Image (cartoon, rainbow, N blue to C red):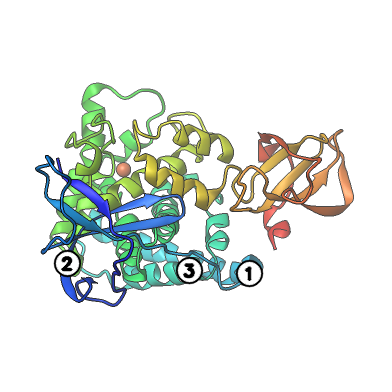
Amino acid sequence: MSKKIDTSSTDVSSKSGPPEIIGRAVTVIGEEIDGDALLVIVEDTEPEVEAPEGDAATPKAVKRRKIVITDSIDFGDELEDARSIQDEAIPVIKDFMSQASNGSIDDVDAAKAIVEKVVSSIFRNQDSMLSLIRVKNEEQYTIGHSLNVAVMAIAIGRQMGFSKEKVKLLGLSAIFHDVGRVLVPEALLKKSGPLTDEEFSAVKKHTSLGSELLGKCSALPEEVAKVAAEHHERYDARGYELGLEGRDIALFARVVAIADVYDAATTNLPYGETLKQADAVKFIYDRGGKQFDKRILEKFLKCLGVYPIGSFVRLSTGQAALVRGQNRSNLLRPKVLVLFDKEGLRYHRTFDFDLLQEEDKHVVSAIDSSEFKVNVDEYLV
Ligand SMILES: [Fe+2]
């Protein structure tokens, strides 16, 4: 068994190229997540730390580096840009889906450009693009789903402390993850009620079909095809089609798997129940260590919050409020806009509560936004 030793006095260079410890080149052997910190684990070729007596393991020098995530502009100031990026993305996704249905994907320049824009928006303020993923279009599920999953994956990647380049690659992998669906008979994808074993096997094939298609596109890095192949694998090895387990599943595929299930669970689809945003967060969180990688789930939760932006909550006062912002230091106490009194009557004047400051009030439960005839967009800015 290898042993990791924290040599916190050593330094890892942040410039590109191999990292260095005290002037010597080392190899990155892995990354770990710890709270808000990303731990970059490196192996020194000339170990400077002796293994404890009797321990035959090779000692490894380990450096911990904290990545600080901050937004450079306000939610409201980014929202307009986020909306236009969303509008711009739809025809781009339609185009590569249509290329896929014709048997090959050749032109991916527009997809790369849109992913860059999403990444830039999320690095400026992640909540703006994340607030838009609640806008669902069931008719064109695969199109909207591809974008929503990319947005969430990018936000999670940023939260994990990935470099911008790595986040772009993750976003590109995410936007293409379900491309194989266009090669599955549409009647199966739209079938309400349970699928037969044979039908389910045909649906499962969208992973290998998509991966094969993406693997043939020389303009796409190999990670993209890998994510298509592995996004339905489960941490406990009960996924499909390869039956991989834990960290044998590609890191990007483990991120995409979480975003994929969240988006599907909150969309009104012919199969399965549609969950409220907060219930979907809980549903996913409860599957940490089983279906999903627990450490990535922590980052997912940090991005979306317990009560995602745009969802409705019942306060301890009985009032109903719209979630307008997160408090990253306490995800149970978001920033809300109170719209309805405890009888369900709409206030003429709305008022803001930052629940972090309002100690005498708290969220009692999430409530279904369809209960209210409210144009959420109007209130988010
Ligand atoms: Fe899928």
Classify the position of ligand 1 by quadrant: top left, top right, bottom left or bottom right.
top left
**CA separation in Å, label 3 and label 2:** 29 Å
Q: Name the residue under label 1.
A: 74
| Contact flag, marks 3 and 2 (Cβ < 8 Å) | no
Query: Is disc 1 surrounded by few (<14), some (14 to 19) or many (20+) residues within 10 Å?
Result: some
In the picture, measured across the screen, residue 319 lies left or right of residue 209, that is: right
**Quadrant occupied by the N terminus:** top left
Above or below 286: residue 339: below
Numbered mark located on residue 26 in the image: 2
Above or below 358: residue 79: below
Query: Is disc 3 surrounded by few (<14), some (14 to 19) or many (20+) residues within 10 Å?
Result: many
Numbered mark located on residue 326 in the image: none
Q: Which residue is drawn at 34% across and 66% down?
A: 168
**CA separation in Å, label 1 and label 2:** 39 Å
Compare residues 79 and 334 and report the one nearer the observer: 334
Q: Mark 3 points at which residue?
A: 123
In the picture, measured across the screen, residue 124 lies left or right of residue 357, that is: left
Mark found first going from the N terminus, 3 or 2:
2
Question: Quadrant of residue 307 in the image?
Answer: top right
**Quadrant occupied by the C terminus:** bottom right
Residue 19: image location, x then y, percent: 23, 71
Question: Quadrant of residue 38 in the image?
Answer: bottom left
Mark found first going from the N terminus, 3 or 1:
1
| Contact flag, marks 3 and 1 (Cβ < 8 Å) | no
**CA separation in Å, label 3 and label 1:** 12 Å
